[in-house]
């Protein structure tokens, strides 16, 4: 069987020009954020401990713990709120259709009985407050004309609800049942976030006009403002109170987070510390989310990097947690001790992980662009995008990639393979044929006369196998710069999606779009392991164990299946639901550990027993 040993989590989904509202639970010291259809639970003191909830049918937008920490309410772009157990296998308690459009924020009442949600919708339905167990409405929310970006529930009685949004308004409601009391138009741009102080005496709003305004929580009257001295120079996207309610943290498009001292009466706020996250200072370093939890100050950048500052020692360098935001299309395991895992996502990001440690840095590519094919050896990374070019970058185990050189192969690469014993030799396949590369030169381009879908080259560069859309495997011997066809193998009933030689090159395995994998003997061309038909959708990726005894396949059906070559295919190990949306990368780290990646932008290590 296979047990989940480690998860390297995706980062929060972000959007330029918008804040994200992350939340947490101070008792378990965990935080919640959303990426795609997943809600991610991460523990600040145990970064490798990650849980993922993937039951939303649409992209999830925000999630919050109930006050007792037992339940989580999460919302999505369809206007649906799901309430589920934080511990007991995420059992679903209730599901409600709350708004007609996207939900941007939701909050629980302090007694855990009511939930308010705000966002986008038709007509007046931009906010709803309802009982958590029955979905019954508990108020009427008039007064907004545009998308409501944030809402907040006063944590003490008498209950109040405040909302703010793209119409520059801050609206105050009394209840329950809640009804409109008053409205403020003190801001001159989008009001991005509103939060009550923990004692329920005041609340603060922050806006794209670079200002923060303080209000009395009982009456809703304005009482003060954050000082403009040493203030933010860009839009303020989010705000969070310290547990004692005496300070706040704000994050801004100016790439800084600021800690403010708030006066007792709420009449003013002064900056006492400016936090800057390490980064290149580019657009991705704009800060869009924050949370003050226990002694952690958490900030999130537009690029998804989570910085964990110590509130008691804010001068210390933050712990950085990062990763992918989009589908991880490929993996490479290199080095022996420690084992390095390199992953690439199609948005062009390459991330470095260390087994047992987790995130170890992003590799800074000199070229920006999407990555379609990706492979790596100890000293070099080779990738191709959608620009018909193959890029070679030297990799010296730092965070910088060396100079990148590119070769234009004339057509969009579909697959690429390196001759591992002399990696300057590479085979690249395009729609109609293959190109042989030596270093940064195309030495030959051959039209094969059929639609090509996958390829692989032996470590010594003497043989290549090319797979076609017709399901046939064409074997070629390579002499000099020319290919000579030596055999055509027919067994697959779908387009070939992946081909890999075993490490000792005595066998090779192939997978197809009709969900079947086959292991072949290289010398005799006989089928070595057949009936590998246990996936329910296209096979995307395939990997061999270092001892040549096992093959792992990953599929669009979200599963990873591990076969033992010496045993019948029916005695396989299946990991169900390995990655929400499909598995796109799989590789053996060693004989006991398999690493996989997928559509959910996460990486998981499975321990075989």
Image (cartoon, grey):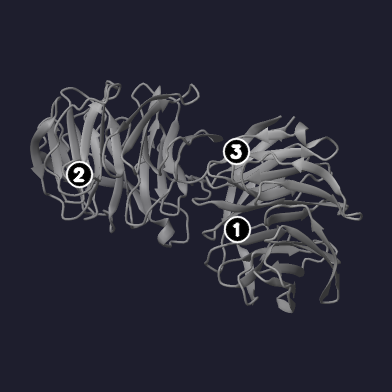
Q: Which numbered circle lies on residue 399? A: 1
| Residue 298 x/y as whole percent | 41, 41
Kind of element beneath mark 1? loop
Q: Nearer the viewer, residue 111 or 27?
A: 111
Neighbourhood count class around disc 3 (C-alpha, 10 Å): few under 14, some 14–19, many 20 upward: many
Dot 1 or dot 2, earlier in sequence: 2
Report which residue position mark 2 lands on.
164
SS for tag 3?
A: loop
| Quadrant the N terminus occupies | top right
The quarter holding residue 378 reads bottom right
Q: Position of residue 416 (x, y in %)?
A: 69, 64
Residue highlighted by disc 3: 578
Sequence-first disc among 1 and 3? 1
Residue at figure coordinates x 22%, y 25% from the top left: 136
In primary-sequence order, the first of circles 2 and 3 is: 2
**Does residue 122 appear in the picture of this structure?**
yes
């Amino acid at each position: 069987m296979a047990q989940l040993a480690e998860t390297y989590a995706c980062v929060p989904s972000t959007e330029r020009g918008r804040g994200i509202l992350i939340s947490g639970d101070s008792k378990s010291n965990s935080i919640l954020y959303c990426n795609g259809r997943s809600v991610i639970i991460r523990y600040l003191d145990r970064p490798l401990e990650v849980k993922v909830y993937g039951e939303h049918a649409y992209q999830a937008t925000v999630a919050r713990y109930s006050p007792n920490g037992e339940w989580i309410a999460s919302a999505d772009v369809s206007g649906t709120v799901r309430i589920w157990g934080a511990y007991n296998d995420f059992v679903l308690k209730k599901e409600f259709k709350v708004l007609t459009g996207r939900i941007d924020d939701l909050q629980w009442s302090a007694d855990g009985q009511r939930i308010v949600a705000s966002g986008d919708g038709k007509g007046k339905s931009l906010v709803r407050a309802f009982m958590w167990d029955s979905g019954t409405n508990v108020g009427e929310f008039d007064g907004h004309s545009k998308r409501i970006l944030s809402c907040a529930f006063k944590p003490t009685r008498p209950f109040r609800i405040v909302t703010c949004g793209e119409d520059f308004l801050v609206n105050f409601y009394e209840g329950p049942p809640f009804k409109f009391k008053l409205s403020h138009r003190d801001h001159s741009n989008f009001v991005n976030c509103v939060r009550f102080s923990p004692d329920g005496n005041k609340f603060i709003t922050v806006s794209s006009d670079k200002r923060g305004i303080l209000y009395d929580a009982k009456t809703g009257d304005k009482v003060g403002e954050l000082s403009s001295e040493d203030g933010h120079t860009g839009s303020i996207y989010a705000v969070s109170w310290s547990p004692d309610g005496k300070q706040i943290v704000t994050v801004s498009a100016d790439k800084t987070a600021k800690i403010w001292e708030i006066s007792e009466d709420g009449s003013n706020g002064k900056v006492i510390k400016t936090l800057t996250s390490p980064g290149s200072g580019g657009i991705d370093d704009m800060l869009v989310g924050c949370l003050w939890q226990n002694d952690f100050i958490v900030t999130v950048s537009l690029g998804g990097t989570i910085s964990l500052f110590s509130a008691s020692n804010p001068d210390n360098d933050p712990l950085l947690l990062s990763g992918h935001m989009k589908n991880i299309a490929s993996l490479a395991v290199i080095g022996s001790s420690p084992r390095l895992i390199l992953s690439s996502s199609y948005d062009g990001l390459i991330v470095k992980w260390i087994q047992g440690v987790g995130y170890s840095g992003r590799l800074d590519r000199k070229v920006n662009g999407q990555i379609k094919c990706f492979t790596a050896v100890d000293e070099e990374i080779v990738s191709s995008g959608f620009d018909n070019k193959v890029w070679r970058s030297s990799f010296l185990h730092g965070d910088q990639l060396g100079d990148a050189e590119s070769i234009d192969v004339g057509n969009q690469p579909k697959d690429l393979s390196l001759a591992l014993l002399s990696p300057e030799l590479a085979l690249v396949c395009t729609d109609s044929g293959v190109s042989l590369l030596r270093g940064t030169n195309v030495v030959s381009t051959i039209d094969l006369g059929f639609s090509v879908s996958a390829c692989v080259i032996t470590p010594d560069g003497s043989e290549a196998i090319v797979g076609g859309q017709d399901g046939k495997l064409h074997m070629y011997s390579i002499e000099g710069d020319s290919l000579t066809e030596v055999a055509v193998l027919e067994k697959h009933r779908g387009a070939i999606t992946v081909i890999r030689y075993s490490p000792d090159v005595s066998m090779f395995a192939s997978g197809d779009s009709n969900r079947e994998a086959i292991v072949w003997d290289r010398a005799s061309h006989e089928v070595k392991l057949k009936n590998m038909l246990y996936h329910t959708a296209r096979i995307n990726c395939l990997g061999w164990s270092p001892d040549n005894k096992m093959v792992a396949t990953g599929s669009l059906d979200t599963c990873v299946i591990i076969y033992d070559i010496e045993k019948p295919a029916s005695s396989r190990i299946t990991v169900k639901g390995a990655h929400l949306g499909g598995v796109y990368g799989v590789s053996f780290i060693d004989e006991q550990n398999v690493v996989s990646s997928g559509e959910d932008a996460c990486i998981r290590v499975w321990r075989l027993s």
